Image (cartoon, grey):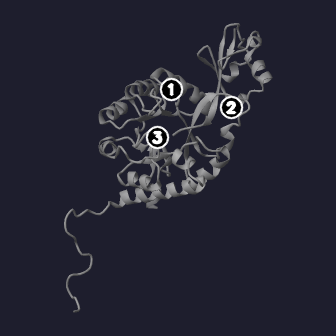
Amino acid sequence: MVTVNGEPLAEAAGKNLLTFLQQREAPIDNIVVELNGTIIHRPEYEQTLIKPNDKLELISFVGGGR
Amino acid sequence: MAEDADLLTIGGHTFTSRFILGSGKYSYDLIDSAINQAKAQIITMALRRTDSAEENILNYIPEGITILPNTSGSTNAEEAIRTARLARELSGSNFIKLEVVPDKKYLMPDNNETVKATEVLANEGFIVMPYVLPDLNVARQLVDAGAATVMPLAAPIGTNKGLATKDLIQILIDEIDVPVIIDAGIGRPSEAAEAMEMGADAIMANTSMATAQNIPLMAEAFRLGVEAGRKAYLAGPGRIIERGAVASSPLTGLSK
């Protein structure tokens, strides 16, 4: 099953990354996406299809440090 | 002006401020005033899984402030390298504050893994600012590996205990040619001033302000401490007489 930030999310499979992020209302300009350990660059979102066992990580900046 | 010439240079980038802020443990609403009062030009922040409900911290950072992503949460070199690459994708800059902390109780950095990660990241063009226990041999290895700075801890993270490692930090200041930035444990502006008097190149602080009653006011106090310490270092502190005393007024011409 697809996992997104560690949570199972079967319905993500089959969508392209851009559609998935838009439907999730993710802050696209302020996140970095890692698919199975590889960073996906923004221009590649639309052509990247989410497959059934993909592991997706959506990462952003938060306050922290010391 | 002479003051303008006193620049902090990190990886070819120059800064007039020698006070680096953290962004943890306080409201994003206070970041702007903390930066202003601190006159900080660099602020560090962490990376975490995106929670869509959370506000984006970048919206709270004023224009022109250098974002220094950190690898907090990494427990070995491999994790830190991954986090650094994600950070570069997000920030668009090569700055990385390298933190490799496997120990959960004391938050002690792993110096060996930090050296390994520094070597890889420096080779990839990162401006690596590693957080370490102050150890001269490790600091030399970091410089050889391409570190842009060395960031020794003064005391364990978040403790506000001050310059517990003072003597070891002084050795780094004396022997290491890249900037030595004191990175954790500084709890009071007086301690920041003391570290700067010792010749530290900059101070990084977060908890000492985040846990203060008035965060912007404490940011200002720290800025003044850092500036005072820096000026004292540049001025060259006066000597100490171990025994006896030396009068500062003339010993002749006394009216009796």
Q: Are marks 1 and 3 in contact (CB under 8 Å)?
A: no
Q: Residues within 10 Å of mark 3 (few under 14, many from 20)?
A: few
Q: CA distance from mark 3 to mark 2?
A: 27 Å
For mark 2, give the secondary structure: helix
The C terminus of chain B - image quarter: bottom left
Query: To which residue does mark 3 refer?
Result: B12
| x 60%, y 27%: residue | B89
Q: CA distance from mark 1 to mark 3?
A: 27 Å
Q: What amino acid is found at the position of numbered circle 3 in the picture?
A: Gly
Examine the image and state in which quarter residue B3 appears: bottom left
In the current view of this chain or complex, which residue is farthest to the right? Answer: A23
Where residue B204 appears, as percent x and y from the top left, is 48, 45
Chain letter of mark 1 equals B
* Same chain letter for marks 1 and 2: no
Where residue B149 appears, as percent x and y from the top left, is 42, 38
Q: Which mark is residue A30?
A: 2
Front residue of this view, candidates B113 and B177:
B113
In the current view of this chain or complex, which residue is farthest to the bottom? Answer: B256
For mark 3, give the secondary structure: loop
Q: Does residue B47 appear anywhere in the picture?
A: yes
Query: To which residue does mark 1 refer?
Result: B74
For mark 1, give the secondary structure: loop
